[in-house]
Amino acid sequence: MMESYIKENYIKDKVIIITGAATGFGKLVAERTAAMGGKIVCCDRKEEELKKTVEGIRDLGGEIEYRIADMTKKDEVDAVAKLAVEKYGRIDILLNNAGTMPLSFFSDHERAWKAWDDCIDTNIKGVVYGISAVYDQMIKQEKGHIINISSIYSNHPVIGGCVYQASKVAVKYISDTLRQEAYGKIKVTCVKPTGVPTTPLFDCIINQDTAIGLVGQNALAMMGLLQEMPGRPDLTEQDSIRNVYIDPSVLADNVVYVMNQPWGINISDITVRSAGEPYIM
């Protein structure tokens, strides 16, 4: 039998910048990579939550630095990269995780436009600013890895996705373009998570009726599954083929898997779903 090419912990001692690290996927990835010996530099605009995340990692012996930063402000994003270089002399991985998801219909424009503005600025400009902040350093090092979080919403246009899905299509195209421009020096990965209801992203939803966009013609089936869920452990067990619920830790583990590769291997695209979900994208 051929021996696995993954022979060691490739995260140990790597300098990893994680944006949107205060909560959700970003927090989970920060905790896991710190536990594996990564040197974490994280940022978020939620100061209180970010400090709690950092303190928790330090209490467990992890190495982590942080900076309060809004991804819509280029100078603040640049300052995060500068902190990493000043502290550790390099930047090995950037996880562009910060984002917002204001699902809404065009008819919601009066109450949604401010959230749409923030979505465009965070999900598109923030990704571009993150890449720009680390690009020169990674090119100078002649190695680096940039991981951008997109979404299954980038697969196909659906009602209720509006500005959010457009922003995630942009992330996919930004990733593909960067991969071509920086090949041989910077690895680029685009991660497309499925809907994960228990993450803070769902707090951004403006109109709950936009769920119809996820399930389309399978709406009645999904309603039935939700009603059955309390008495059907097979619908929520991670080892069940009927599982319709994906725990946030599953996505975090897959992001860590993408990171934990030798420099010569790039997992360029990865979509993470639950096996029994009836989503149409």
Image: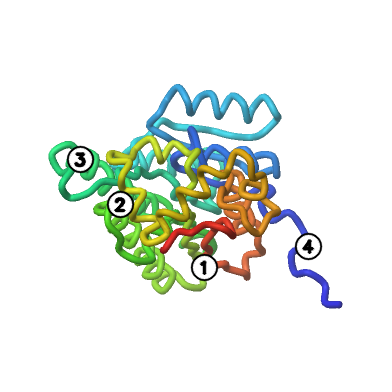
Q: Which of marks 4 and 2 is in front?
A: 2
Alpha carbons under labels 1 and 3: distance apart: 33 Å
Alpha carbons under labels 3 and 2: distance apart: 11 Å
Give SS at disc 2: helix
Q: Do the residues labelled 1 and 3 touch (CB within 8 Å)?
A: no
Q: Which amino acid does label 3 sit on?
A: Ala
Quadrant of the image for the N terminus? bottom right
Q: Nearer the viewer, mark 4 or mark 3?
A: 3
Name the N-terminal-most of marks 1 and 4. 4
Name the N-terminal-most of marks 3 and 2. 3
Q: Find residue 164 and name its label.
A: 2
Alpha carbons under labels 2 and 1: distance apart: 22 Å
Q: Which residue is under mark 4?
A: 7
Query: Residue reaching furthest bottom?
Result: 1
Q: In this view, does 186 lie above or below 252?
A: below
Name the N-terminal-most of marks 1 and 3. 3
Give SS at disc 4: loop
How packed mark 1 is, by other alpha carbons closer than 10 Å (few <14, some 14-19, many 20 or more), is some
Q: Nearer the viewer, residue 113 or 74?
A: 113
Q: Which amino acid does label 1 sit on?
A: Ser
Q: Find residue 112 and name its label.
A: 3
Q: Find residue 245 and name its label.
A: none
Q: What residue type is labelled 2?
A: Tyr
Query: Residue reaching furthest right?
Result: 1
In percent of width and height, residue 179 lies at 44, 69
Give SS at disc 1: loop
In percent of width and height, residue 51 lies at 50, 24
Q: Which residue is under mark 1?
A: 268
Q: How many labels does the image show?
A: 4
